[in-house]
Image (spheres, helix red, strand yellow):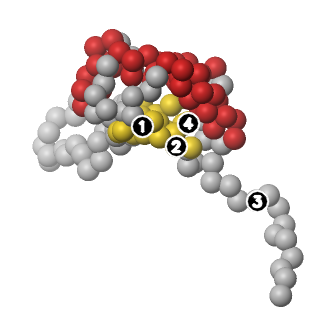
Amino acid sequence: MSYPPPSGLPIVDAMTPAVLVLAGPVTRDEVAGLCDDVRARLEAGGAGVVVCDVGGLGPPGLGTVDLLARLQLAARRAGGRIRLRDPDPALHALLDLVGLRFEMEGEPEQREPALGVEEAVEPGDPAV
């Protein structure tokens, strides 16, 4: 039994970003290939974001900071950005120390209150 092709455009989930898993210590020779991977994933997907799973990178150091900075630069040049998944708290602190800001998965966006937080107004409070 065969079915006719559906009419209209195919359904594409453009909200699901591509994932790049970074494992083990990354050598300088591998950085260029990973930057190419980020550019290729941004061109192939429509989300404009590549999620970099950094949980397997090991203890953070300046090599990791250099890698992430280069990946972010490659993504920006391709018109996108990277988002970090499962960063070590020490990596997060090191990135803050050197002044690099990355979007982390699971963090609320700026100026957005955390879920479940509501301001209550008591009757009789003066208007502000």
Q: Is residue 76 visible?
A: no
SS under mark 2: strand
In space, the residues marked 2 and 1 are separated at their CA atoms by 13 Å
Q: Which tag, 4 or 3, sits closer to the chain's start?
A: 3
Q: Which amino acid is tagged 1?
A: Ala
Q: Which residue occupies the foreground of this view, 11 or 85?
A: 85
Residues under numbered marks 1 and 4 in contact, where contact means CB atoms less than 8 Å apart:
no
Q: Quadrant of residue 25?
A: top left
Crowdedness near tag 3: few (<14), some (14–19) or many (≥20) residues, C-alpha within 10 Å: few
Question: Which is in the foreground here, disc 2 or disc 4?
Answer: 2
Residue at the extreme top of the image, as rendered: 98
Find disc 4 in the rendering and name its residue. 49
Question: Which is in the foreground here, disc 2 or disc 3?
Answer: 2
Question: Which is in the foreground here, disc 2 or disc 1?
Answer: 1
Residue 46 screen position, x and y as percent: 66, 42
Find disc 3 in the rendering and name its residue. 10
Q: Which amino acid is tagged 3?
A: Pro
Give residue 65's mark. none
Residue 37 screen position, x and y as percent: 61, 33
